[in-house]
Amino acid sequence: MRLARKLTLGLVAGVLAVMAAYAWVQIGHEVLIINADLSKNEKLGHGLAAAIESIWAKEGEARAREMLDTIDRHGPDVIQLRWHRLRDLLANPPEDVSNEELAALKQRNIVTFRPTTNGEWVRHIYVPLGVPGEEPAVLEGRESLQEEHRYIDMNHRELAFASALVAIMCGLTAMGLGYWLVGRPLARLRDHARAIGAGELEGRVEVRQHDEIGDLAEELNRMSANLAEARARLVAETEARIATLDQLRHTDRLTTVGRLAAGVAHELGTPLNVVAGRAAKIATTETGQTAEYARIIQEQAARMTAIIRQLLDFSRRHGPKLAVCNVRTLVGRTVDLLRPFAERHGATIEAESRGGEPFARVDQNQLQQAITNIMMNGMQAMPRGGRLRIEIDSCMARQPDDEHLVAQPYLRIAIQDQGEGIPSQHLAYIFEPFFTTKGVGAGTGLGLSVAHGIITDHGGWIDVHSEVGKGTRMTIYLAAAEPSTAEAAS
């Protein structure tokens, strides 16, 4: 509203200046009119003096005085006529007439202005009268200027009142228009600019004016939208950079873990083979409790050897040797291989393939290892037994990290268990090496990591959906392939 007040004050000052100039000109016109009237009255006084002189010369002084009294009595009240002898005026001169003027009164008229005791302005006109052979006389015309002054004062008041009224109306109009057209929209623009400065870029300012303020509002809205887009791009780029850095750190961590695993496997492999061999020999030569202890040692050594083999596979994994493979057949062999393990854990395995023959270009050994690891993880998640279901079908899908790719045909291998499920806070880490939620001795944390690496090397991915208490569903996506006759037969 400060701008509206300034505009209002400027407009009021301009209006007052115009009205003051108009009043000055108007009063000047009124003064000219009054002066013209006074000039007319003075001219009439000269004519009256000539008529009085003529009557005086023809009919005598008494008749002239009588005529002057008659004219004074019947004339306007504002004009009074008096007969003076010149010697009486010289003996008692009026206050506003100097001796020099009285001396010149014999040859010319004298006009004076003076106020009365009550503040009334009066004009006096002294006209010399002369008739040969008679004593010189003076005709005094006394004219009150009170009405003229009252008229000028009334014009002053009317002009002042009109000026004040015009200034007030212009001020109120300018204040209202300034608030509606300037103050209110500018306040909205100010609030919107503050919101932009505070980081709120989604809002818009609504100023429906087809003028410069409306254009400014549109530019602010456009700037806010551009800033929001730039911030969104910046956030996306920042998240992408952070994800890339995390991936680089993870890759470096995997490299370090792989080297460490290879070293540990090499260092422990030979002693474990010796321990397993000696335990097997003791188990075959001894009986009773000693043989039982030897078999326990042999089983644990075999378990440790399997863990070391996983470490070596993790550290030495090379690129897959691809060939077209019937995935349903491969899954069937894997199920037959793991069925005894499932029976010992009280689990049942169900496999189902929908659609035609599912073919994919894969490394059969590596893919079987990945499926085995996921199935083993699912059965270990069901300590009280349950059902492990495997479904194979075809679908159209796209890579999860690139939404701009066109959907391609993929084979989908879904492995669903009825285990305890994975908490949501752990889902982001299940494919990291050595991460496990199982108890001590129940897992190494390498199975899913190895499976993830194998599927990624094949150009696919693993999708995980888990609910605590309801189980986990891990879905493998592999690019579908069309087999040749020889490959299909094999």
Image (tube, rainbow, N blue to C red):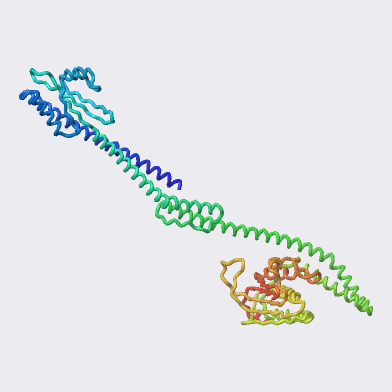
Residue sitting farthest toward the left: 58
Viewer-proximal residue among 20 and 245: 20
Whether residue 319 appears in this view of the structure is no
Q: Residue at x 46, y 57 (%)?
A: 206
Q: Residue at x 77, y 78 (%)?
A: 384
Residue 123 in the image, given as x and y percentages of width and height = 22, 28
Q: Residue 259 at x, y = what percent?
A: 77, 62
- Describe residue 284's horizontal placement relative to residue 449 as left or right: right
The quadrant of the rendering that contains the C terminus is: bottom right
Counting from the top left corner in percent of width and height, residue 118 is at: 28, 30
305 left or right of 90?
A: right
Evaluate whether residue 424 shows in this view: yes
- Above or below, comparing residue 239 to residue 138 in the picture: below
Q: Position of residue 133 (x, y in %)?
A: 8, 17
Name above or below for residue 385 compared with residue 253: below
**From what the image shows, is residue 310 above or below residue 124?**
below
Residue at (32, 42) in percent of width and height = 161
How many marks the image carries: the answer is: 0
Compare residues 301 and 179 and report the one nearer the observer: 179
Task: Using residue 244 as the reference point, say whether residue 439 is left or right of it.
Answer: right
